[in-house]
Amino acid sequence: MSVYEELSTLVQQGRANNVKDIIAAELEKGTNPKDLLQDGLLVGMSIIGEKFKNNQVYVPEVLIAARAMQAGIDGLASALASENMESKGKVVLGTVKGDLHDIGKNLVRIMLESKGLEVIDLGVDVSAEKFVQTAIDENAQVIACSALLTTTMAVMKEVVDEVNAKGLKGKVKVMVGGAPVTEDFKNKIGADYYTADASSASDVALQICQ
Ligand code: B1M
């Protein structure tokens, strides 16, 4: 079994401590952190997601798998982040109101920070008003919204509306992402950018801030 298969299996089994130990050992050996993420942790989480959809596992199993995944991401964070500490811009990030999924959002944060961007992470269940007020207070160039539920995607439109209502259209860019979000949806709600993954999100945010 390769180390990637092993990580995938351990995520599915929710064995956070083992995930943490393997990540530390692999980083020590010089294994590429992005490969550990893409080919190990994310594969395991995606298998759990499929099983969840097919009622083969339930919320408790998904939660412990999510904790193991998060332990892996925490272990990878400093390896994924660059050493460049000078802030290249400011991003307000969060998972939208009604939505508690934060693993993808946390990945986005790591990638944004790895590009030298300052991130104000509002966590989960964030209202449109909170996103926009924080962007005003912090003088941020970007609001980055994550949603994992088809029922919470609509809050992204509220964020766009709030940005417009405060006269910030064009000044603060709204980026959207998360599994159910698409380019088409972004166009429908009038957001500025959609990206499919955390890495592309950080590329786009950096372009906006430069
Ligand atoms: Co939830 N859940 N969940 N869940 N859960 C999904 C999303 C679901 C697709 C599962 C399924 O049915 N197959 C389904 C949504 C269906 C839908 O709306 N169409 C679902 C459901 C229904 C629910 C509940 C309603 C279940 C229930 O209670 N009956 C409930 C809702 C709670 C709530 O939010 N109010 C719920 C709860 C949970 C847990 C708490 C158990 C747990 C979350 C733990 C946590 O986040 N701390 C959980 C999990 C783990 C999942 C799955 C299995 C995995 C999500 C994940 O973390 N993926 C998920 C199934 C799946 O996605 N396969 C599922 C890994 C993560 C790295 O990917 O977040 O997609 P993701 O991020 C990606 C990209 O999307 C992108 O970058 C990342 C990759 O680089 N990205 C962005 C994300 N945000 C971005 C922002 C950007 C750009 C890119 O720009 C700003």
Image: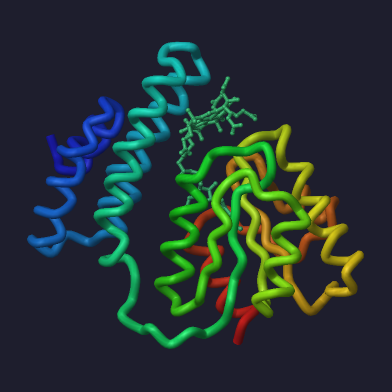
- Total number of numbered labels? 0
Give the residue at x 60% y 54%. 94
Quarter of the rendering containing residue 6: top left
Quadrant placement of the N terminus: top left
Give the residue at x 72% y 53%. 183
Query: In the rendered view, does 141 fall on the left or right side of 154?
Result: left
Query: In the rendered view, does 21 fall on the left or right side of 74?
Result: left
Q: Position of residue 190 (x, y in %)?
A: 84, 59
Query: In the rendered view, does 200 fall on the left or right side of 66?
Result: right
Q: Position of residue 199 (x, y in %)?
A: 47, 62
Between 75 and 122, the one lying in front of the other is 122
Quarter of the rendering containing residue 24: bottom left
Between 174 and 98, the one lying in front of the other is 98
Q: Position of residue 125 (x, y in %)?
A: 63, 44
State whether residue 141 is above or below residue 48.
below
Give the residue at x 57% y 81%. 89
Quadrant placement of the C terminus: bottom right
State whether residue 21 is above or below residue 76.
above
Query: Which residue, as the protein is rendered here, is positioned at the far top?
Result: 55
Query: In the rendered view, does 201 fall on the left or right side of 16?
Result: right
Q: Position of residue 50 (x, y in %)?
A: 46, 24
Give the residue at x 38% y 35%. 66
